[in-house]
Image (cartoon, grey):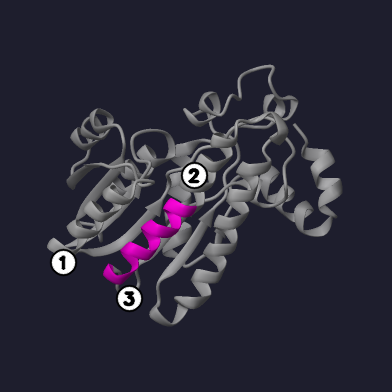
Amino acid sequence: MKIAVITGASSGLGEQYALEIDRTRNDIEEIWLIARREDRLAALAQRLEKKTEVLPLDITDSECIAKYSALLENKSARVALLVNNAGFGKLGEFCSMPACDGADMIKLNCEALTVMTSVTLPFMEKDSEIINSCSIASFAPNTGMAVYSSTKAYVMSLSRALRAELKSQKINVLAVCPGPMDTEFLPLAGITPGKSRTFDTLPRVNPTAVARKSLVASKRKKAVYTNRLFYKFYRLLAKLLPHSIVMKLAGT
């Protein structure tokens, strides 16, 4: 039985990935939903037609990772798709941010993603896929979100390197780099109207469209998916211009 594993599945983009996989991926027979909020996962599972496994786990906790690893072993799992979607950000200058906020971002966005991938890979076969939720913030450093953009630069670098390493096994790794979405991410990050000139003016992207189109890109063995022409142009600018200039253009 081919399985899709989704972290951060209780809301936002993770929820949309579950709905789109359930609707469009005939090769997937079972979906494992991972997040801390069991009630939200259970409610989502009720909306899915495919067989689901609700796993209320904190993937930054070693005991939860051990439980997940044991489940893979006990079920002799065949993971066809791993969606590393769990993550969060915080708006604010580095010097005024509590140390724990930066550490927690690194732990979830980088460490937990790495551990989940490492633990899951032995259960992935030829033509499997890994989708890593990255961000347009990975294209260049961002003042006001220094730690967050750094964690996403890590995700981008890891995704590209891992994709090259796994090419011989025909396992693709896609870094998904959306712009801001009107999900729980923004208020949890402290990004509310009037707090950031940049975020007040940036066009929003649709999480349903991001999930749908990035799943297609993953199936086509793409390395990076960025939605909307505006953000594709920003990605190009970040390649062509010195990052000192890009930071001034995109500063919060």
**Is 76 in front, or is 227?**
76
Q: Is residue 205 visible?
A: no
Query: How far is the residue under mark 3 from the one under mark 2?
Result: 25 Å
Q: Which amino acid type corresponds to the residue marked 3 in the rendered image? A: Lys
The stretch in magenta equals 111-123
Looking at numbered disc 1 in the image, what kind of residue is underneath it? Answer: Ser
Q: Are marks 1 and 3 in contact (CB under 8 Å)?
A: no
Q: Residue furthest front?
A: 99
Q: Please give the name of the residue rendered at 61% of the width and 42% of the height, measured from the top-left corner.
A: 148
Q: Is residue 121 magenta?
A: yes
Q: Name the front one of labels 1 and 3.
A: 1
Mark drawn on residue 66: none
Q: Residue at x 44, y 59 (%)?
A: 114
- In space, the residues marked 2 and 1 are separated at their CA atoms by 31 Å
Decide if residue 49 is on the left or right side of residue 24.
left
Mark 3 falls on what kind of element? loop
Residue extending farthest to the left is: 74
Q: Amino acid at mark 2?
A: Val
Residue closest to the eye, 59 or 199: 59
What is the CA distance from the residue labelled 1 to the residue labelled 3?
A: 16 Å
Is label 2 in a helix, a strand or a loop? helix
Query: What type of secondary structure mainly makes up the magenta span?
Result: helix
Q: Which mark is residue 210?
A: 2
Side (left or right) of 126 relative to 174: left
Query: In the image, which disc is placed on residue 76?
Result: 1
Tag nearer the camera, 3 or 2: 3
Image location (x, y in percent) of residue 159:
52, 63
Per the rendering, the mark at residue 126 is 3
Callout 2: few (<14), some (14-19), or many (20+) C-alpha neighbours within 10 Å? many
Q: Nearer the viewer, residue 221 or 74?
A: 74
Is 132 contained in the magenta span?
A: no
